[in-house]
Amino acid sequence: MEGSKIEELVEQLKIENEIEKNYLKKQLNMMKFMMVSMAGIFLVLFLAVVILLPKVIETLTSANNAISQISSTMEEIDGIFDSVSSLVEESEQGISMAIDSMNSIDFEGLNQSITDLGNVVSPLAKFFSKF
């Protein structure tokens, strides 16, 4: 009896060993699949970096150049605005001087002088119109 019990236990160990082998084979296959998948992902990422990195650097360089040009253009615009501002101030001073000159004219006296001149010229015009 004892011999059959041992044989049963050995048979059970063989069955369990086969089941464990099957699980280990599945696990090995799964590990191989994961390794191939990870290598594929790594390859895709590596290629993406190799292909895209120069383009990203080129784009950033172009953006930096554009920003530099925009900055210099803004400085030129500031200079133009300063010139226009000083031109407006000079024009304002000239207009102010002209208005002051016009305000200093004695229009009543000028009107009176024109009337007096008209009074003097009118008899002369009548006199010379007879000739």
Image (cartoon, rainbow, N blue to C red):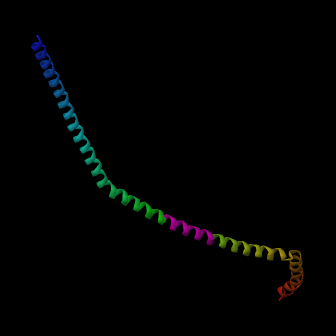
Queried whether the magenta region covers residue 72, the answer comes back as: yes
Q: Residue at x 17, y 31 (%)?
A: 25
In the picture shown, does residue 17 fall above or below 82? above
Q: Left or right of 19: which side holds 63?
A: right
Residue 120, percent from left and from top: 89, 84
Q: Nearer the viewer, residue 125 or 95?
A: 95
Residue 127, percent from left and from top: 87, 87
Queried whether the magenta region covers residue 29, the answer comes back as: no
Magenta range is 70-83
Residue 13, percent from left and from top: 15, 21
Can you tell which quarter of the image residue 79 is in?
bottom right
In the picture shown, does residue 130 fall above or below 84? below
In the picture shown, does residue 72 fall above or below 122? above
Outermost residue, bottom side? 131
Q: Residue at x 13, y 22 (%)?
A: 14
Q: Residue at x 33, y 58 (%)?
A: 54
Q: Left or right of 25: which side holds 44?
A: right
